[in-house]
Amino acid sequence: MSQSEFQPAAPNMTVAPQYVVGVDYGTLSGRAVVVRVGDGAELGSGVFDYPHAVLSENLPSGAARQVRLGPDWALQVPNDYRLVLQNAVPAAIRDAGIDPADVIGIGTDFTACTMVPTLADGTPLNELERFANRPHAYVKLWRHHAAQRQADRINELAAARGEEWLPRYGGLISSEWEFAKGLQLLEEDPEIYDAMDHWVEAADWIVWQLTGRYVRNACTAGYKGMLQDGRYPSADFLAALNPDFAEFVSSKVDHRIGRLGEAAGVLSAEAAAWTGLPEGIAVAVGNVDAHVTSPAARAVAPGQMVAIMGTSTCHVMNGRELRAVPGMCGAVDGGIIDGLWGYEAGQSGVGDIFGWFVNNAVPPKYHDDAAARGLGIHEYLTELAACQGIGEHGLIALDWHSGNRSVLVDHELSGVVVGQTLATRPEDSYRALLEATAFGTRTIIEAFNDSGVPVTEFVVAGGLPKNRLLMQIYADVIGLPLRTIGSTQAPALGSAIHAAVAAGAYANVQDASDAMGAQPADLYHPIPENVAAYSVLFAEYKALHDYFGRGTNTVMHRLKHIQKAALGARPVEAVNSVKTAESVSA
């Protein structure tokens, strides 16, 4: 939408101060921040945890609790996202102590690829009574990996046909993305597929809720929707996957694309009532949590790789030229900032792995000792692990507990720890997992360097940089200077920066980033002797990585197959084939 297509509440730059709101939708919660337009000062914030969190075993209520989800499923309830607007945004305004009338714009970002099946008016299908007990009617979260077999078929067919778009994604597309998840929906619940009018990125759905207008954003369309050079995969290609999939683009996906930093529309009366913000202010085109963070970190120059480290890690950076990087999630013209190629890679599990370990593999005594010290369990284990020399624990781990996003793009892979003995302690395994995620990042950086997209600086945002041991391990493993950014809500700040551009306060995202981006926080330099020691361990990691991920040993895939067979042959399909009394009457 061009600026001339609507009339947002115009910012009066002669009156100071003015503010924008950024809202960051993460895996488990939504966070809002109030930012001053003139200098990017973060004045207040609010957080709202999704009431339904992540649905990985059952649907949320009533008879639907009997619907068992299969392995690798991860769903969410879309109304939880509306509740963020109704709770986190007003909380941020109160925390900032500002007059809401002085807010001139709002921007949002989301985890990608999080997909919502909707009717023509944007109603999610799970909100229809007849579909409330159908898993495919719900949001498929980014980490829903149950479409791996569909992704495999897409990759095999694209490689066989020499599809031009495949190298833009490092030669492989992920089970997380729009087309794999859409094909799974068609093949496992065609009734839901037929009822669906739009297959919508949550990043765009929430903007639709704010404005009443559906606009696809260029970022997710390029990285997750395989839109390259103005074209999606052809109907002929889709028909070869499944004849009923031929019109997927034209009937379910294709829609007007909004450029990053543009206004998608203005805040509706309904959304103004939810948020307490003025009706008619500018609403920025949707975006992705990782990609909005680069402007927030003042790290948009080629060579500056930004890692947003939380439950997973997304790595983004700009380059002047297009290069094919094996295993990258995508290269998109203007995917981060206009005039440069935006590159993306990622790790499916990072903080999630650490969380899994402390929740499932740490004995009660450690929790009791941590509590007695007034420490959280992560802090306590970090303190114990920091006392070790590099390699002292005798372990190497593979960070694939949630599959591998880059560079192998295989979510059927799983975690490994090698070297455990009867003397292995929790702090040993914990440190090995910290190191494994750093080795995974080094693997990604080396793929970029080897492909002619040099990485010269590593910038970290998200929830994990507060762990100083982890940050030093990363600097030592990758052998690069590492800086963290002086914002605890970097994606929300990035969304606020885009809101300021959408409201007309700045001419472009670069100018807004220069004025509003966060200053550096901590700087970590690689320690030469640690770099040398970790290079020895990385060689062992790489050997395991290639053995299980690239070689002929397919034990991880076989175990997944055995697990699925033991849990029952695709229980979701079986449930979907049974019509409930409600669906029959409807």
Image (spheres, grey):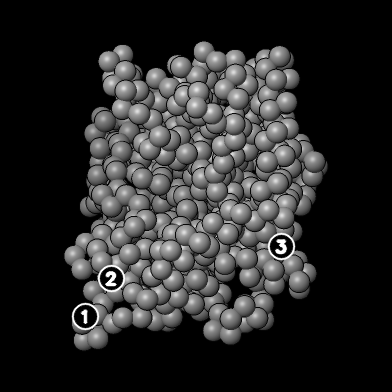
Q: Residues within 10 Å of mark 2 (few under 14, many from 20)?
A: many
Type of amino acid at the residue the image marks with label 3? Leu
Q: Return the disc, 3 or 1, that comes first in the chain's sequence.
A: 3
Q: Residue at x 40, y 34 (%)?
A: 361
The residue where tag 1 is placed is 582
Q: Return the disc, 1 or 2, that comes first in the chain's sequence.
A: 2
Helix, strand or loop for disc 2: loop
When asked about the image quadrant of residue 104, the answer is: top left
Q: Is residue 235 visible?
A: no
In this rendering, the answer to whether 523 lies above or below 363 is above
The residue where tag 2 is placed is 133
Q: Are marks 1 and 2 in contact (CB under 8 Å)?
A: yes
The residue where tag 3 is placed is 166
Q: Residues within 10 Å of mark 3 (few under 14, many from 20)?
A: many
Direction from residue 276 to residue 461 in the image, left or right: right
Q: Could you tell me residue 152's position as x and y percent?
A: 62, 66
User: Residue farthest to the left?
Assistant: 62
- Work out whether residue 67 or residue 489 is closer to the camera in this orientation and state it: 67
Q: Return the disc, 2 or 3, that comes first in the chain's sequence.
A: 2
Type of amino acid at the residue the image marks with label 1? Glu
Q: Residue at x 64, y 34 (%)?
A: 439
Q: Residue at x 47, y 54 (%)?
A: 142
Type of amino acid at the residue the image marks with label 2? Asn
Q: CA distance from mark 2 to mark 3?
A: 36 Å
